[in-house]
């Protein structure tokens, strides 16, 4: 599951038009979870998430893909090189 953050200054209605049962309003700065994976080929102006009929394009002007990549700690093990 991917996470997107609304980076626009406006609230956005996603998944259905405002007022409909499946609509979800996303406030500026709010993050949402989106089902699916990034498509293999990405347009330059959007994140394409999902495949075939389930694919959706999320404009980069409105959304930021949030990555929660763990930081790999730098090893503090002693050096194995010998000084002469």
Image: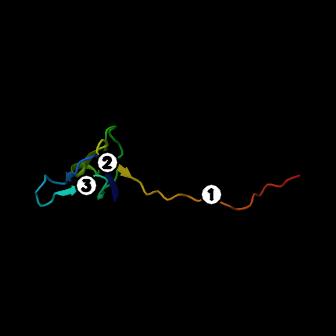
* Residue that mark 1 sits on: 74
Q: Residue 83: horizontal and vertical position, in percent?
A: 85, 53
* Residue that mark 2 sits on: 7
Q: CA distance from mark 3 to mark 2?
A: 9 Å
Q: Residue 25: horizontal and vertical position, in percent?
A: 20, 56
Residue 44 lies left or right of residue 15; in this view the side is right
Observer-nearest residue: 83 or 48? 83
First in residue order: circle 3 vs circle 1? 3
Q: How many other residues sit within 10 Å of disc 3, few (<14), some (14-19) or many (≥20)?
A: some
Q: Are marks 3 and 1 in contact (CB under 8 Å)?
A: no
* Residue that mark 3 sits on: 27
Q: CA distance from mark 1 to mark 2?
A: 32 Å
Observer-nearest residue: 80 or 73? 73
Q: Quadrant of residue 2?
A: bottom left
Image quadrant in which the N terminus is located: bottom left
**Labels 1, 2: front one:** 2
In the image as oriented, which residue stretches furthest toward the right?
84
């Amino acid at each position: 599951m991917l996470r997107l953050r609304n980076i626009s200054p406006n609230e956005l209605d996603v998944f259905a038009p405002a007022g409909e049962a499946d609509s979800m309003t996303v406030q500026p700065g709010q993050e949402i979870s989106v089902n699916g994976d990034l498509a293999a080929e990405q347009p330059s102006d959007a994140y394409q998430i999902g495949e075939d009929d389930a694919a959706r394009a999320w404009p980069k002007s409105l959304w930021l893909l949030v990555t929660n990549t763990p930081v790999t700690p730098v090893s503090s093990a002693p050096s194995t090189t010998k000084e002469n």
